[in-house]
Image: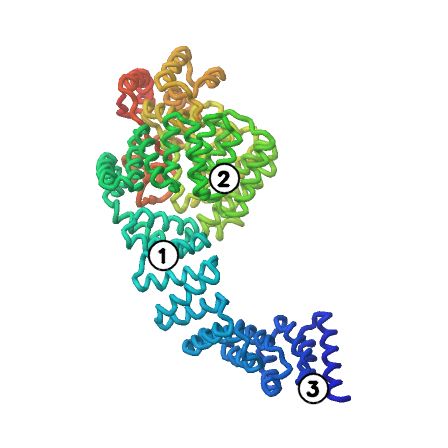
Amino acid sequence: MSTANQAVVCLNLGNDYVGSQQWELAANCYRQAIEADPNLAAAYTSLGSIWQHLQQPQAEAEKLYQIISENPGSVNPNFGLIVGESLEKHQDSQGAIAWYNLAIAIHPQLAVARYKLAQAYHNTNQVDLAIASYQKAIELEPNIYIYYIGLGQALTSTKLDEQAITAYQKAIELKPDFSWSYHHLAVILTRLGRIDEAIDNYRQEIELNPDFYWSHFHLGDLLSQQNQPEEAIAAYRKAIAINPQQPEAHQRLTEILSRDQKTGEDALLGGRYEEAIAIYRDMVAAKPDYSWGYYGLGLALLNLRQWSEAIEVFNQAINLNPDCFWSYNNLGYCLFKQGEIPQAIDAYRKAIAIDPEIPEVYIRLGDTLLQQQDIDGAIAAYLDAIKAQPDGEIAYIKLRHLRTYSFIKLQPEQIEAIASGYQQAISQVPHYPEPYINYGDLLTEIGDISAAISTYKQGVLAKTKIIRPEFFSNHWETASVQGPNFLIIGAQKGGTTSLYEYLCHHPQIIPNLHKEVDFFMWQYYRGLDWYLAHFPPIPPGGEFLTGEASPSYIVDSKVCDRISQAFPEVKLIVTLRNPVDRAFSQYQDHRNWMGQEKRTLEQAMIDEIAILDTIDDPTQTERKFWGCQYGYLLRGMYVYFLEKWMQKFPPEQLLILTSEELYNHPQNTLKQVFEFLGLPDHQLSEYPRYTAGSYNPIPETLRQTLGDFFRPHNQKLEELLGRKFHWSP
């Protein structure tokens, strides 16, 4: 058989292998065809068509190079480009250069081969050869914009900036909608100090490609240099919105803000709001078009609850900078506090249109929609907050308490939407307990107790594994669930959340799934298995403890009986608070959070006093009381409830504290609690007040009235416990 016929046979056999996708066998046949007949063009074409499928293209290239370099006539130069590109992908730039040169030898007028060769030279730091090759490509095809970009990059690396500028400008002339030309040009102009031109080019680039972090970042730098802080801040904020994890824009934003309004921000952060107002008033007087001055002034007014003026000032900030999310967000809050609900909703929606990724605004929007009884809208807003931050606690709490505080029954479509949101959150943050709590509560609500129990247990496991990894490794598989070793039973708004959080920092206390289970008060009919699903397994011996804090327990004598029967050895902790302050705090919660309380403070207190004056035993209030009252005063009549608990539990199982002691002397108070629980002392570096509210003071005449109401009850409490509380009216 002649070599020519042999080559054709190999070619055809290779084609058969291609049909069955046996690429290596096909390549071997094509190479044999080329060896038999170096002028068989079809063999080169076929081999090039499967080149990207080869596992070892470098080895194949070496075998072919000598054959082709000696017989270039029948080879399509594009084959050389295919092989060269493949070698570059495999980090063999020198091999690629050889093949590109071979393609040029076959077809000297092939501009794209010159361009590829120039790129390979540039990648191997042979910049002079790269420039020459780019220039030759341009000489052959002068209207290809990408050739000028490559030339500009090579010229830039040798500091031939003016020539590089000319190259980029030509690229822009040929293709004005290619953003990278403007970017490269802006970089050179910045280096040459031609800042205004660089700013113009970055802005043109951003118009074409608005989602590139570094364009906004560098634009911010240049605007800052040009003493345009407001525009620089906007550029940095846009960079942060594109990539919140990148630190540079955060750092620059901090620097520019600290330069321009450090004193004002210091005053705000230090709570010196009057001082901040004076500083920002001077700032906007000196620079009336400086939106951030109005924004800072608005924040100071907001913190002083001067809602009307804050609304006016935030509107001025928005007029100057209509793209500032935080101005709309805080404007909405001030409008909400003023009772201008539709306007607040509109402001929040405008904030979301600017930046839909910040959970705080969805939470505020949900709270505001509740004021209009728009339950669907509120649910959607809270779920959007979870979507924006699946490991953020507040939205879960809002949804968890939605039915409790708004007296609503969820509809099937609402349940479906909420369940879907929780399931998605669990898949996104499987280590975070809040979605398990809410999903379990939802399953409980619809009566699927078995699924609820399973969900709670998953949440307990996830939480324990994260916050107590050593305990989890050593005890999770061997210990069993025993239930609570301690219960914080009250009083509501008496510091129970803070105490619970402090206790949970002790390394020998293994937290339950969440603070308030309310089993013995509201969920008792769910069964003990449902309750125990909220607790981690605890080994015997008392080295580790767990517990919960449900401040509703203290007021119900049935709860006392149930706990004594289920867990007769459990230790109970009570935190009492000046009942006047406690009543005011609870009222504000009902008034401000869910908007359920419509009465004025004075009217709510007068109404309850009138009813309580007709009740002989505060522990035996009937449903009709709870149907029209929230127990602002009743819950502070501690003596009558404590008498019941002290009859059921011995003194060594009952510890009574005050929130005033807890907050004023937390170290000593916690030491007392740990001794009570049989644990070694464990002090924290700080003791923040959890869920602390901030309100205008109680009118003095009402405070005196409430003080008079509570005085005889407080005296009985002091006699019962043998201690003074020194609660002033």
Residue at screen point 36% across, 17% down: 605
Q: Position of residue 523 (x, y in %)?
A: 53, 29
Can the viewer see residue 56 in this picture? Answer: no
Where 699 sits versus 483, above or below?
Answer: above
Residue 313 found in image quarter: top left
The amino acid sitting under disc 1 is His
Residue projecting furthest to the top = 614
Disc 3, disc 2: CB below 8 Å?
no
Secondary structure found at label 2? helix
User: Label 1's element?
Assistant: helix
Question: Crowding at label 2, few (<14), some or many (≥20) Cα neighbours within 10 Å?
Answer: many
Label located before the other in sequence (3 or 2): 3
Q: Is residue 296 left or right of residue 118?
A: left
Q: Earlier in the sequence, mark 1 or mark 2?
A: 1
Does the CB distance between marks 1 and 2 fall below 8 Å? no
Q: In the image, what residue type sits under mark 2?
A: Asp
Q: Residue at x 43, y 75 (%)?
A: 131
Which residue was labeled with disc 1? 218
Q: Residue 384 bears which disc, if any?
A: 2
Q: CA distance from mark 3 to mark 2?
A: 69 Å
Q: Find residue 710 and report its horizontal and vertical position in percent.
A: 32, 18
**Where residue 353 is drawn, which disc sits there?**
none
Quarter location, residue 73? bottom right
Q: Determine whether, in the image, residue 219 is placed left or right of residue 26.
A: left
Q: Which mark is residue 36?
A: 3
Give the CA distance from mark 1 to mark 3: 59 Å
Select label 3 or label 2 by which is in front: 3
Q: Secondary structure at mark 3?
A: helix
Q: Nearer the viewer, residue 449 or 713?
A: 449
Locate the C terminus by quadrant: top left
**Measured along the vertical axis of the image, is residue 711 above or below residue 290?**
above
Residue farthest right in this picture:
1
